[in-house]
Amino acid sequence: MLSNILSKVTIRNQHALQQAHARAVQYCMQQDHKQHSSHAQRQNVNDVFWIMETIWQSMQAAQWQEAYTLTVQAGLLDDLARWGSYSLVLDICQAFCLKRHGS
């Protein structure tokens, strides 16, 4: 009985947390639009901070397709690789792979 109650509370808490991350996605997107650096203007990781934050928040909100679409549309992995930020490329790819394998 207690385990059922705890399970329901955990599910509710996870849902509330995902909703908070979904709201954070909207905030991050607004910040990125304010920064408004075009793809051609990007020169380093700082120029894609809000894009990366939006992707991370999307992942935390279990909005995996949105996170992937933004990653591709923004050309994020190519930019990060061009700047030598291979650890960030790896982190992003691992996050998608972990989701794919159900972890």
Image (cartoon, grey):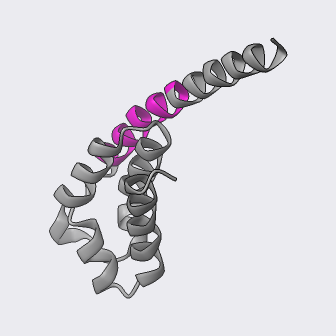
Q: Note whether 49 is above or below 20 in the view shown.
A: below
- Of residues 62 and 22, the one drawn nearer to the viewer in this rendering: 62
- Tell me what residue is drawn at x 38 percent, y 51 percent: 55
In the image, is residue 24 part of the stretch drawn in magenta?
A: yes
In the image, is residue 4 part of the stretch drawn in magenta?
A: no
Question: Where in the figure is residue 8, as x and y percent of width and height?
Answer: 67, 16
- Of residues 6 and 68, the one drawn nearer to the viewer in this rendering: 6
Which residue in the rendered view is the most extreme toward the front?
A: 1
Q: Note whether 98 is above or below 19 in the view shown.
A: below
- Tell me what residue is drawn at x 34 percent, y 44 percent: 64
The residues colored magenta run 19-34
Q: Is residue 8 left or right of residue 86?
A: right
- Tell me what residue is drawn at x 35 percent, y 54 percent: 51
Which quadrant of the figure has residue 22? top left
Which quadrant of the figure has residue 7? top right
Question: Where in the figure is residue 82, as x and y percent of width and height?
Answer: 28, 85
Q: Note whether 21 is above or below 65 in the view shown.
A: above
